[in-house]
Image (cartoon, rainbow, N blue to C red):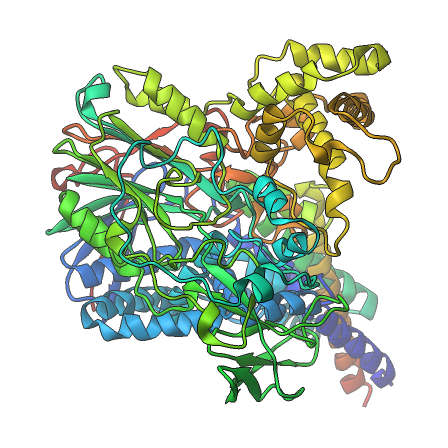
Amino acid sequence: MKFLVATILTALLAFISGLFLPWWGIAITSLLVAVIIHQKAGKAFLAGMLGVFALWAGLAAWINLQNQGIMAKKIAAVLPLGGNPVYLILFTAFIGGLVAGFAAMSGSFLRSSKESR
Amino acid sequence: MRIVPFAISTIVTAGLVFALNKQWGTIPPVGKFVSPQHGFWQNAEPTGEGFNAELNFPELKGKADVYFDERLVPHVFAENDEDLYFIQGFLHAKFRLFQMDLQTKAAAGRASEIAGPKAINFDKEQRRLGMVYAAENAMKEMDKDPATKIMFDAYTNGVNAYIKSLKEAELPVEYKLLNFKPEEWTNFRTALLLKMMAKMLSSGTENDLSNTNAKSIFIPDELKAMYPQVHDSLAPIVPKGTVFEKPGIVPVQPATADSLYFGNKEVIAAKEISKPDINNGSNNWVVAGSKTQSGVPILSNDPHLELSLPSIWYEMQLQTPTSNTYGVSLPGSPFVIIGFNDSIAWGVTNAQRDVKDYYNIKFKDNTKQEYWFNGKWEKSARKVETIKVKGGADVLDTVAYTVFGPVMFDEAFSNDFSNKRNLAVRWAAHDPSNDGITFYKLNRAKNYDEYADAIKTFDCPGQNFVFASKTGDIAIWQQGKFPARWNRQGLYVMPGEDSSYMWQGFIPQAENPHSKNPVEGFLQSANQRPVDSTYPYFIPGSYITPRGITISNKLTAMSGITPDDMMKLQNNYFNTLGEDARSILTGYVKENELNATEKKYLDILRNWDLMATPDSKGQTIYQCWWDSLEIGIWKDELSRTTPISPFPDEQTTMELLKRDTALKFIDDITTTKQETLFDVVTIALKKASVELAKAEAEGKLEWTKFKNPTVYHLLKDALPAFARKGLPVGGNGNIVNAITHSHGPSWRMVVQMSTPTEAYGVYPGGQSGNPGSQYYDDYLDNWVAGKYNKLWFMREGDRTDKNVKWTMKFSKG
């Protein structure tokens, strides 16, 4: 339950941060969530990772659907991901998830380090 | 204690954010770039996206409405000129900002700021050619006339209003890929854009440097034969038989010309890096009512330029209570450049005239502060150019300015060749002029007199302005500021130690080649020499002869012409030069010496229908064989200098062989044997067959597969994913449908001067510069198929018409 709440909250706050902050706002919000909802480092990492992965994958997939893949096909050839929009969506989500995961892990350790005092 | 793991994971997170927020070489900042709320996903425009908006700007004087049709062409209805051009600037920026920014930075020699160290030499050359100097001179002229300054100011304000409204997530995707930001627009950048056009069209139309090398090895008669001024089969722009008046200015050849100029046998080792494409040209023609089905004139124009996505052109209609114009505009400049209004239509092709010369400068010493001129040491002006380089230190380059112009080549810049000379460049584009105003006036011209008045002050690049009016007039003027040269002046690098070799004046404007309502009932221009040999001035240039012959022949034979006929002619694939050239190839080949493959290619060529259609194998064989023959005839002689002397153009080679099959250049001077035309034609086929067999094995013998027609993104090879490759079109530079690998008709337009005006047009791109938009390349397939869009010349009463898809409302606020 805690895990699910953390994941959803990570996604939600990451989305809000995206409206106001640069892209790396997801690191701050994911860390915050991990501090507020304390879990062990591994779980916190997973919740952070999953939250932003799901958010970014969802947003990218939605945009891609609306755009009928025009942009994604081109960017997936630039990056290079074989011109495949699905790979590009997964790559996008992985990058966001990775940053959020490590940030959340930091949040977990931060809370533990405070509590251990 | 969890401080250590906290520290480690925080460092990892921060490191990740840092690494993903930074550009690594050509890899964009990945985190920022892929973030769906910030990066490229934000540029993925939903198909069916609306463009309705209500916008308020304090700079506007009144209200204005912009109606977009289904092709995203804006029809701008403003209350006054200032608002009109403010909105034009706003729309250019909204749809084409990256293009405007990139092109003007490149024009100013600032490409290294975006592309890094590899562009340093390009930037140096731009500055040494005097691109910024030319734009500064143009600016002074623009500022002198308050009425035009207001228009340019309004345009600039419009561009900046858009830039200011832009959020980071809305930046065009190229900025995100290359990780930089748009720069504020200025009138000066508009001047730079016009100089970019001047370079494109009037800087590559001479071969002075390599011609000088040819002069070092050939005698005058040979030079005249290899690089003739007038081709035998020329179909000039001004109909043959036109009588020219006595020249208003007669330039005098300097007394020292024989010894210091013609007799000088020194080789010049300098070479330009970014010389404009020789195929930068165009077709235009106009037929009078006497030759059309409707009884009114029809005007056609297709400018041939490097094709790009986004296109160089942006289509629009500009209307105020006193003017109403439709056509294509150049993002970066106000006005419609090619188009029509309620009374007239006009189009342009390039004049191809040589308006750029080089002078050999003698400096007192390496500081280049003084140079020898008219018997004494003159002070030079020195400009230190600072080139900012992405990912590197600034590069400083000092350019000396002489009475002739900037010293383009010297020991600090001579392209790695050993022979270091100081060459100053004199280029007509350096002279102060307000060329933009011509288009302001043309947009509003109502008849021949107003057209003639509008183009009169257009100086550079020289253009053939074709014209038709609703009152039935047709006309053409080759307009520009052209130096009056003594015979053969400026074909080669000239002595720069005194004033005797300078341009002595310009051909009076009224004597520029022109024609109005000729008996033939049509006028055409296709980058050929504008006049026959009776014109009283020496006018060198890089002329292209074959297209004019095809067009002239076709129009002569046609009657009852419809707009559809004109579209077909623009898409015509007939190879006029190939007709003559083939008889030389097939007539002089030694068939008994050919193997089966060579024989097969010969047979295909014999049966070729002379059309450069996409599926033509004959065109591929012809082109390879002919190119191979040209190398066989010329390369041995021309390679005697470094850099190599220029190849005679293909029309010249064909005419030389047609006149004299024992031409002395046929012999290969590197062999002891005396080769005949039979020998070189046969060897040429044997060599070409190797290439052809290889192409055939790869399934590329069909012309379109062989040349792989491509419309690249502006960043070319850096972004192949944004290009459209393998377009199934034929044509070639010397064919009316002048499509080469990446160059060709950048806009095709046909306008019938009926009431209401009937107009058609298409360009190989789309209105949006955004690669993530469905409007990025949506005209391209029509262009490939030779189809046209019907141009909707919207009227005041059409504001609620069903063709209006979206409306943008502008008002003061």
User: Which of the 4 image quadrants contains residue B166?
Assistant: bottom left
Report the front residue among B13 and B266. B266
Residue at the spot x=40%, y=39% of the render? B533
Does B589 appear above or below B460?
above
Answer left or right for B630 relative to B56: right
Does B632 appear above or below B521?
below
Residue at the spot x=68%, y=28% of the render? B626
Q: Quadrant of the C terminus of chain A?
A: bottom right
Does A108 appear above or below B778?
below
Answer left or right for B194 relative to B628: left
Q: How many marks?
A: 0
The answer to whether any part of residue B109 appears in the image is no
Residue at the spot x=75%, y=67% of the render? B416
Residue B644 in the image, given as x and y percentages of width and height: 72, 51
Residue A109 in the image, given as x and y percentages of width and height: 79, 78
Report the front residue among B700 and B720. B700
User: Which of the 4 image quadrants contains residue B161?
Assistant: bottom left
Residue at the spot x=54%, y=23% of the render? B575
Does B135 appear above or below B296?
below
Residue A86 in the image, given as x and y percentages of width and height: 68, 42
The answer to whether any part of residue B315 appears in the image is yes
Report the front residue among B351 and B251. B251
Q: Quadrant of the N terminus of chain A?
A: bottom right
Answer left or right for B137 relative to B674: left
Residue A87 in the image, given as x and y percentages of width and height: 72, 45
